[in-house]
Image (tube, rainbow, N blue to C red):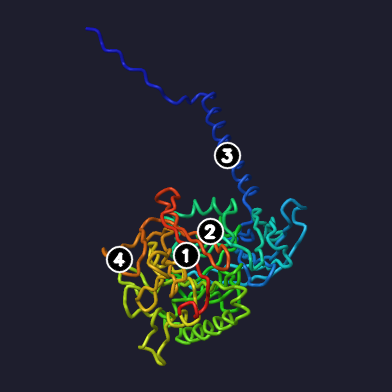
Amino acid sequence: MTRARTPERHVISTSADGETQIKMKMELRILLYLCALIAAVCCVPPIGTQPEQVHISYPGVKNSMLVTWSTANKTESIVEYGLWGGKLFSHMAKGNSSVFIDGGPEHRAMYVHRVTLTDLIPAASYVYHCGSDAGWSDIFYFTSLNESVSFSPRFALFGDMGNENPQSLSRLQKETQIGMYDVILHIGDFAYDMHEDNGRIGDEFMRQIQSIAAYTPYMTCPGNHEWAYNFSHYRSRFSMPGHTENLWYSWNVGPAHIISFSTEVYFYLEYGLDLLFKQYDWLQADLQEANRPENRALRPWIITMGHRPMYCSDDDGDDCTQFQSYVRLGRNDTMPVAPGLEDLFYQYGVDLELWAHEHTYERLWPVYGYKVFNGSSEEPYVNPKAPVHIITGSAGCREKHDGFIPKPRDWSAFRSTDYGYTRMRLINTTHLYLEQVSDDQYGKVIDQMTLVKEKHGADAWR
């Protein structure tokens, strides 16, 4: 009987040749590891002193631009810059830094650097980088603002953008970097939320937004998602005009006076009722100054931006869905009673009010006191008898969309739940154009409106 053949077995050789091969493989692995380690040490920048989160803003001073960035360690604050096409970094400006400590359990510290570039040539293109000899940023560029009152600035405006699901960001990145906008207006709610993970979410968002905010003035206002530690991340990370920790301010561009303010003073009373009254007094004084005949003649458009709207037709039960809105009518449960803003803005002839908070887009007919005041039935936005409101809070965040009530309010002209953002152009002293871009529909313009005001100020309502 023939015995079945035993299968051959492959065993690791213990001969001298086999030992040599094993030794060579081990040495090769050690060599590769050392090469990788050396490469890491040589190629990784000095993280603690490396600039990041670069963004620029208009400081409210003619022929100037303010550059802001962050480092983990304390370093010098320097911007080297020069005219596009000229000698690279022919100019240098120094600033200073302030330490910001997150309120979370780790008490993480960061240094926020600010440098103001002055004596810029209006409407000229500049190349810059920021940092110090301990680490420099990438090279960026910007166009200084045209200081003429006949300038026709172009804006991108949106609110409620997070670092999860920031759907509109990629389109805004491209459009910003090819020079489509002169100003970016971010109308509250950043990152979702800046304070999370001991401030690391804020860092991540500011690195993401650098792709637009390092190229175009990035002007902001606070939203409810900035509430933590008395809005400390918002107060510390941005650099807006004035000396109010970015909470409220105004500035001029082209034929417009733009006012940014905080709606959150009506809701976070634990941080002090005095902020609400200080802001109201400031708003009243600022509007009075903007309405001086010589000022209103130069810059007839008055535009406001605040996070929580006075009106909306969403179905989420927010303040704007209530007839007795705090922002619109004030609060009667405080001592003293807190005044609202609708009457104030109407009294001083505010033309356009920009809002966010609702994760939708909604354009309203001209409205005051829940009543529509169209210019005419054929041309509602020609010489209207009340301010126009726009809600643009659908840039994209982890909280996704909001919904609308089935039947629009009488003052609701157009509404959409598409992710997207708004473009605006101040054409001249009488014409303002606005359109809504749907990112869901690959950049399609889904709404547009031209606001015509042959007369500005409270007299326009008569």
- For disc 2, the marked residue is 209
Where is mark 1, residue-wise? 190
| Kind of residue sitting beneath label 4 | Pro
Percent position of residue 326, x then y: 38, 80
- Graded by Cα atoms within 10 Å as few (under 14), some (14 to 19) or many (20 or more), the crowding at tag 4 reads some
Closer to us: mark 2 or mark 3?
A: 2
How far is disc 1 from disc 2 in space, using C-alphas?
A: 10 Å
Q: Earlier in the sequence, mark 1 or mark 2?
A: 1
Q: Quadrant of the N terminus?
A: top left
In this view of the protein, which residue sits in the foreground, 153 or 12?
A: 153
Label 2 packing within 10 angstroms: few (<14), some (14-19), many (20+):
many
Residue positioned 58% across, 38% down in the render: 32
Alpha carbons under labels 3 and 1: distance apart:
46 Å
Instruction: Check if mark 1's residue and mark 2's residue have beta carbons within 8 Å.
Output: yes
Which labelled disc corresponds to residue 408?
4
Side of 284 where 397 appears, left or right: left
Which mark's residue is nearer the viewer, 3 or 4?
4
